[in-house]
Image (cartoon, rainbow, N blue to C red):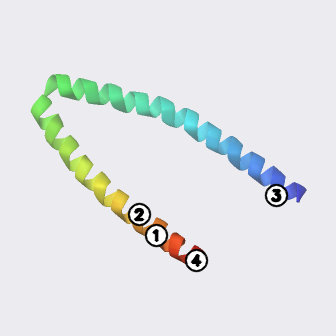
């Protein structure tokens, strides 16, 4: 039981570290996006449209995984 508690605590610590790094990285991505929009709005807009299409595909696949788990719980 104690080992499991230590594993959870270590895992949560790692998640906190990842979150901190991702926060900084997300700011950098937003800065890059702002710069891109200022330099070439039309091209940036087209790229963002493609990113959104792919994000929708990923979300659809993630929902399928969620539904698989939901069915297993019944």
Q: Quadrant of the N terminus?
A: bottom right
Judged by depth in the image, the label closer to the viewer, 3 or 4, is: 4
Query: Callout 1: helix, strand or loop?
Result: helix
Judged by depth in the image, the label closer to the viewer, 3 or 1, is: 1
Label 3: few (<14), some (14–19) or many (≥20) C-alpha neighbours in 10 Å: few
The residue positioned 41% from the left and 68% from the top of the image is 64
CA separation in Å, label 1 and label 2: 6 Å
Instruction: Please tell me whether residue 66 is drawn above or below residue 3 in the rendered image.
Output: below
Query: Callout 2: helix, strand or loop?
Result: helix
CA separation in Å, label 3 and label 1: 29 Å
Which residue is denoted by mark 1 in the rendering?
Answer: 67
Which residue is denoted by mark 4 in the rendering?
Answer: 74
Which residue is denoted by mark 3 in the rendering?
Answer: 4
Q: State if disc 1 and disc 4 touch (CB < 8 Å).
A: no
Which residue is denoted by mark 2 in the rendering?
Answer: 63
Judged by depth in the image, the label closer to the viewer, 2 or 4, is: 4
Q: State if disc 2 and disc 1 touch (CB < 8 Å).
A: yes
Judged by depth in the image, the label closer to the viewer, 4 or 1, is: 4
Residue 35, which numbered label?
none
Instruction: Name the foreground residue: 9 vs 74.
Output: 74
Residue lying furthest left? 42
Which mark is first along the chain, 3 or 2? 3
Instruction: Please tell me whether residue 4 is drawn above or below residue 51 in the rendered image.
Output: below
Label 2: few (<14), some (14–19) or many (≥20) C-alpha neighbours in 10 Å: few
Residue lying furthest right? 2
CA separation in Å, label 2 and label 3: 30 Å
Which mark is first along the chain, 1 or 3? 3
């Amino acid at each position: 039981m104690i080992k499991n508690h230590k594993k959870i605590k270590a895992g949560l610590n790692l998640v906190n570290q990842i979150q901190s790094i991702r926060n900084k990285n997300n700011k950098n991505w937003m800065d890059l996006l702002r710069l891109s929009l200022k330099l070439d709005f039309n091209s940036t807009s087209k790229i963002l449209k493609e990113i959104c299409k792919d994000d929708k595909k990923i979300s659809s696949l993630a929902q399928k995984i969620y539904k698989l788990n939901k069915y297993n719980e019944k």
